[in-house]
Amino acid sequence: MVDFQSRDSRLAAGDDSDEGDKQASEGEENGGHDEHADRDGHDAAEHGHDHHAHDVESVAVGVVTVSSSRTEDDDPSGDAIVSLLAEAGHEVVTRELVPDALDEVQGTVDRIVRRDDVDAVVTTGGTGVTPDDVTVEAVRPLCDKRLPGFGELFRRFSYDDIGTRVVGTRAEAGVANGVPVFSLPGSEDAVRLGVSEVILPEISHLVGLATRPEEDEPDTESTGSDAEDGDDTVGGEQSGEE
């Protein structure tokens, strides 16, 4: 009589032994290295991209204060932007003050982003919900791309200071003519928060990406979380906005 149980046990043991011999043989042929690990590591190195390869060291910035009541000698928010940028090693190449008028704001920003010596623009004021707050409406049509994460992050940080009043803050950013444009509220506290916590950590990277030649672009997106076009996440203005 054939002992099927004993036979099956022997076959199973033989299979395990053969598999073990095969793996050992492959290990010897590969010099003790994991072939799959080596191949995966090589592929990652070959196809990887330096996400910050195009970052610029110093950014030339245009600053625009939008206010019908402030003057060049009384512009604490504009002064704060200039000071914070300079401390971080960036240069303010032009600074202007315009009234709360859509055409004037739009014309000024459009002219500045077309200058060859400007890499980025920061505006302050006019991002609230009063009838004369028109910065967002003036700047948005100039932008080829929106940067919704800027406003989202600014409002997240602002919540710690002003709570639910962040719903009245429409700070936002975009890219116009290859130039990142950041629109901040008019209060000095809001400007210091936005510049220090959001703009300065990313401005060199964003400018580098916005001006990168097309032939240098990788096959995949530089980030995997680009917001969809048309995502409208606007809030309102900081308390004290003019």
Image: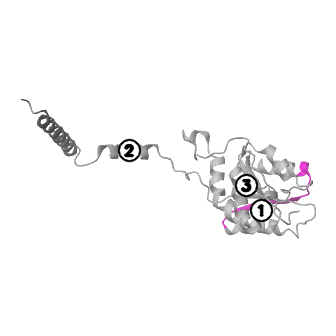
Kind of residue indicated by mark 2: Asp
Q: Estimate the spatial distance between the alpha carbons at disc 3 and disc 2, rounded to whole Å.
A: 39 Å
CA distance for labels 2 and 1: 48 Å
Crowding around mark 1 (Cα neighbors within 10 Å: few <14, some 14 to 19, many 20+) is few
Residue at 65% x, 60% y: name it: 58
State which tag comes first along the sequence, 3 or 1. 3
Query: 135 left or right of 91?
Result: right
Which residue type does callout 3 highlight? Gly
Q: Is residue 119 left or right of residue 133?
A: left
The residue positioned farthest toward the top in the image shown: 1
Provide the residue designation for mark 2: 40
Q: Residue furthest left?
A: 1
Q: How many numbered discs sit on the rendered protein?
A: 3
Magenta extent: 88-104
Q: Quadrant of residue 130?
A: bottom right
Element carrying mark 3 = helix
Magenta-colored stretch includes residue 153: no
Tag 3 residue: 151
Local SS, label 2: helix
Q: For the residues carrying marks 2 and 1, which lies nearer the camera in this image?
A: 1
Of marks 3 and 2, which one's residue comes earlier in the chain? Answer: 2
Residue at mark 1 = 164
How is the rendered protein coloured?
A: one colour
Residue type, label 1: Thr
Instruction: Give coordinates of residue 133: x percent, y percent.
Output: 88, 55
Give 138 or 204, whichever is nearer the viewer.
138
